[in-house]
Image (cartoon, grey):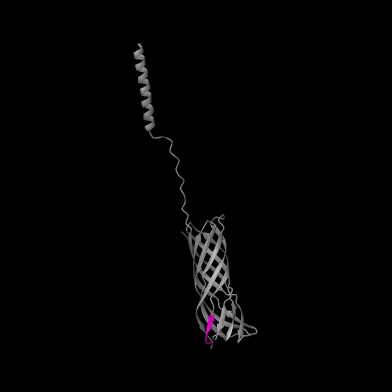
Amino acid sequence: MSRILRLSLCTALLAGTALTAAQAADLPSAKMAPLAPIMTQWSPWMIRGRALFVIPQESAKLRIGGAPIAGGDLDISNSVVPELDISYFFTRNIAVELVLGVTPHNVKGAGTLAGARIGSAWLLPPTLMLQYHFTDLGAFKPYVGVGVNYTIFFDEKAKGGFTSFDLQDSFGLALQVGFDYMIDKNWGINFDVKKVFLEPKVKVNNGLITGKVKIDPWMIGTGVTYRF
């Protein structure tokens, strides 16, 4: 075999090998690329609707014409009202909650003032809570909270022969404990207890009777949770 023929055969073999490698590179790989992980979307918003039982733990220090009324006290009625709250989660554990609702109450005399009808009022007590939520207990999600309450008194009406009845709007500390039990990723049931420390000033008969009323209500609620 001549030298020229041998070179021609080698060249043909190298060309065929290169072509086969190029065709193989164009074929799809049997090994699939790894799939990107599917991330579960997390929403920071949650709302609750509750039935709220408001139980004042009242006492009062009253004066008439500047002189203390010995044994004079007040009795404030309980109330059951609807409540709405909106929560925003900064993390899965830390949240703020805004509590909204209004409650009506009747005020009567107690102690040496027992039997006297004094007045009635509506309370608008928006409360902002900072909460810590425990998240390692499955569907059971307890939480604790501390916050501030600002109570607005409105539609005050004097009763029982009194000519005026006025409660001054005031701030108060609020404490909270509760839990959500999630039925699925969106819906759950809620139970919640709050203690609000509230002591507004009161004036009756245009200031003839003055003093402070310690209301300090327990606020016990239960209802439905919706997580977006």
Asked if the magenta segment contains residue 182, the reply would be no
- Residue under the point 36% across and 19% down: 11
Q: Is residue 221 above or below residue 18?
A: below
**In front: 226, or 214?**
214
Q: Is residue 126 above or below residue 95?
A: below
Say which quadrant the N terminus sits in.
top left
Q: Is residue 41 above or below residue 130?
A: above
Magenta stretch bounds? 162-166
Residue 210 showing in the rendered view:
yes
Q: Position of residue 90 (x, y in %)?
A: 51, 58
Q: Position of residue 24 (x, y in %)?
A: 38, 30
- Residue under the point 36% across and 12% down: 3
- Is 22 situated left or right of 68 in this image? left
Magenta residues, dominant SS class = loop
Q: Position of residue 202 (x, y in %)?
A: 56, 80
- Residue under the point 37% across and 32% down: 26
Q: Farthest residue in the front direction?
A: 66
Q: Farthest residue in the bottom direction?
A: 161
**In front: 184, or 68?**
68
